[in-house]
Amino acid sequence: MPPFAEKFVHWSPRVLGLLFAAFISLFALDVFGEAHSLGETLLALAHHLIPTALILVAVLLGWRWPWAGALGFVALAAAYGLMMGGHFRWDWFALVGGPALLTAALFAADAFLRTPPVPSP
């Protein structure tokens, strides 16, 4: 594999994971439109940033162990699908679950490329 492709497969899930965390954190900004006290607003903001924290944990795990990042992002996509419950819409899942599954696939590709081949006997 060309060096550029190896670097792309190595860095793209990390960058995409960070961009995905930034995108998801934008949804937390809606707490500022509500009329609450400062304490209630900060509590609501912390509550809304829990998914971002979980995404960042998956990125950090994947940074060192790509397989863990792949499994983490698959788990995040599955959790989002389960949270949708009976209101499952493919377009919503594609917007949130799609980037998570793409990041998982890129982490898995990075893990596959970093795994040394097993010598044959």
Image (spheres, helix red, strand yellow):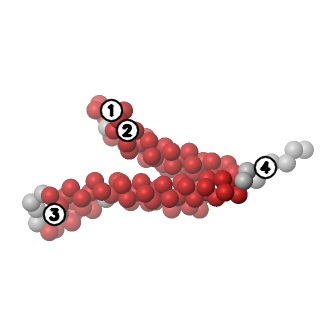
Q: Identify the amino acid type marked 4.
A: Pro
Badge 2 local density, few (<14 within 10 Å), some, or many (20+)? Answer: some
List x then y, in percent, for residue 48. Answer: 27, 56
List x then y, in percent, for residue 91. Answer: 35, 35
Q: Which residue is mark 2?
A: 93
Q: Identify the amino acid type marked 3.
A: Glu
Q: Which residue is mark 1?
A: 89
**Between marks 1 and 2, how big is the CA–CA gap?**
6 Å
User: Closer to the N terminus: mark 4 or mark 3?
Assistant: 3
Q: Residue at x 45, y 59 (%)?
A: 18
Q: Quadrant of the C terminus?
A: top right
Badge 1 local density, few (<14 within 10 Å), some, or many (20+)? Answer: few
User: Closer to the N terminus: mark 2 or mark 4?
Assistant: 2
List x then y, in percent, for residue 53. Answer: 38, 60
In-front residue for pair 68/23? 23
**Is 20 left, or right, of 34 in this rendering?**
right
The circle on residue 35 is: none
Badge 3 local density, few (<14 within 10 Å), some, or many (20+)? Answer: few
**Between marks 2 and 3, how big is the CA–CA gap?**
30 Å
Q: Is residue 9 above or below residue 80?
A: below
Image quarter of residue 33: bottom left
Q: Please say if the residues under marks 1 and 2 sit with CB atoms less than 8 Å apart.
A: yes
Q: For the residue labelled by badge 1, is the local secondary structure a helix, a strand or a loop?
A: loop
